[in-house]
């Protein structure tokens, strides 16, 4: 089975409206079994709105894991600092 078919059949939550509005579905990364992947993706986000979407999906679907919420908070602070320079 190809990777794309496996992805289409996965059990992960999906947020097509966020994907349409923001260009990606946060659940794709947040549902990864690789613990580093969500944090790595969050560190690369450049948009406050996308960070908010990640926070909302994290809390709703995964209960608000500390490591993920801390990464989001840290990235929000970094983006705020970058914008004020």
Image (spheres, rainbow, N blue to C red):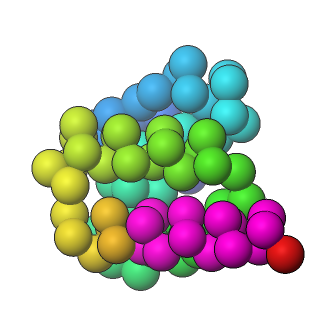
Find the residue positioned furthest to the front. Answer: 84
Residue 32 is at least partly visible in this image: yes
Residue 1 is at least partly visible in this image: no
Identify the image quadrant of residue 71. bottom left
Residue 9 position (above or below residue 41): above
Find the residue positioned furthest to the top. Answer: 17
Q: Residue at x 73, y 59 (%)?
A: 46
Identify the image quadrant of residue 27. top left
Find the residue positioned furthest to the bottom. Answer: 36
Question: Residue 29, image x and y in percent?
Answer: 47, 56
Residue 72 position (above or below residue 31): below
Q: Main secondary structure of the magenta part?
A: helix
Find the residue positioned furthest to the right. Answer: 85
Name the residue nearer the viewer: 42 or 32: 42
Please indicate whether residue 47 sits to the left or right of residue 4 in the image. Answer: right
Question: Residue 61, image x and y in percent?
Answer: 23, 40
Q: Residue at x 55, y 63 (%)?
A: 76
Name the residue nearer the viewer: 9 or 17: 17
Identify the image quadrant of residue 49. top right
Q: Residue at x 71, y 36 (%)?
A: 23
Rendered-image quadrant of the C terminus? bottom right
User: Does 1 appear in magenta?
Assistant: no
Q: Residue at x 45, y 64 (%)?
A: 72
Count of numbered circles on the image: 0
Q: Which residues are magenta?
A: 71-84
Question: Residue 39, image x and y in percent?
Answer: 45, 74
């Amino acid at each position: 089975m190809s990777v794309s078919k496996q992805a289409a059949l996965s059990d992960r939550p999906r947020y097509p409206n966020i994907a349409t509005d923001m260009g990606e579905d946060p659940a794709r990364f947040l549902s990864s079994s690789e613990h580093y992947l969500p944090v790595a993706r969050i560190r690369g986000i450049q948009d406050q709105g996308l960070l908010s979407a990640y926070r909302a999906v994290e809390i709703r679907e995964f209960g608000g894991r500390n490591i993920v919420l801390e990464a989001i908070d840290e990235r929000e602070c970094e983006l705020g600092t970058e914008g004020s320079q």
